[in-house]
Image (cartoon, grey):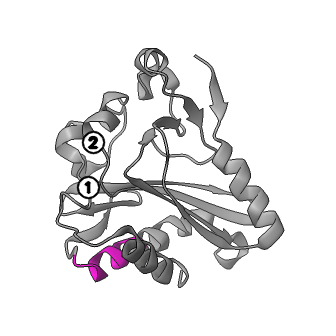
Amino acid sequence: MEILPLPYDAIALERFRREGPFIWLWEPERTEAVLGAGTPETDVDLARCAAEGVPVYRRRGGGGAVVLAPGCLVITAAYEASRRRFATQWIGPVAEAIARALRSLGLHGAAVRGMGDVAIGDLKVLGSSLYANRQVALYQGSLLVDPDLDRIARYLPHPSREPDYRRGRSHAEFMTSLVRAGYRGDMAALRAALLAELERV
């Protein structure tokens, strides 16, 4: 199965070149598997993706594989890399901003866990990656608002590496969505809260 570069990377980097720092919140229209730094054969069920017409991409940033699908909100934030001494100093503050936004909407258990995840209690609602060069720190996170979690888990084997707080749990036991966690607001309120916090990073 052909694995292509993630097109949103190129779109984001070109936008940064033209406009400078920006925040882009968008919703996937179809299901796509996205590889990070891992090995395709172990991180994504390539045979199932091929059989069911799910494209597989590789992003520039690291981290584990994710599935983007309707019901997710993708957070793409591009910052001037020179504002922090090390690229790794970006992912924590951005994740903290997302957790603050969720708490402001009533999801009081939202907190940063692992390496840049956001969880509600010990259930993951956001995974993230970071790509940086001398000009830009490009953060990308996938927030599980109200996707079909079973469909997401369908294309991802158990990861070869996992954060301590996962404790060996399956995707079904480890993930939740904002709606399952009790969020009853709309997407507009969620977007506004996220933008307000991410602009302060």
Q: From the viewer's side, name the closer residue of 169 and 195.
A: 195
Left or right of 127? Residue 137 is right
Point out residue 24 in the picture as x, y percentages from the top left corner. Answer: 59, 65
Q: Residues within 10 Å of mark 2 (few under 14, many from 20)?
A: some
Q: Residue at x 64, y 45 (%)?
A: 60
Residue 145 falls within the magenta-colored stretch: no
The circle on residue 108 is none
Residue 177, picture quadrant: bottom left
- Please say if 22 is above or below 196: above
The stretch of residues the image draws in magenta is 98-106
The kind of residue on which mark 1 rests is Ser
Mark 2 touching mark 1, by CB under 8 A? yes
Q: Residue at x 41, y 73 (%)?
A: 188
Quarter of the picture holding the N terminus: top right
Point out residue 112 in the picture as x, y percentages from the top left corner. Answer: 33, 66
Left or right of 130? Residue 92 is left
Left or right of 123? Residue 153 is right
- Please say if 163 is above or below 196: above
Q: CA distance from mark 2 to mark 1?
A: 8 Å
Q: Which secondary structure, mark 2?
A: helix
Point out residue 62 in the picture as x, y percentages from the top left corner. Answer: 55, 46
Q: Residues within 10 Å of mark 1 (few under 14, many from 20)?
A: many
Q: Main secondary structure of the magenta part?
A: helix
Res 169 seen here: no
The circle on residue 149 is 2
Q: From the viewer's side, name the closer residue of 1 and 63.
A: 1
Res 18 seen here: yes
Q: Which residue is mark 1?
A: 177
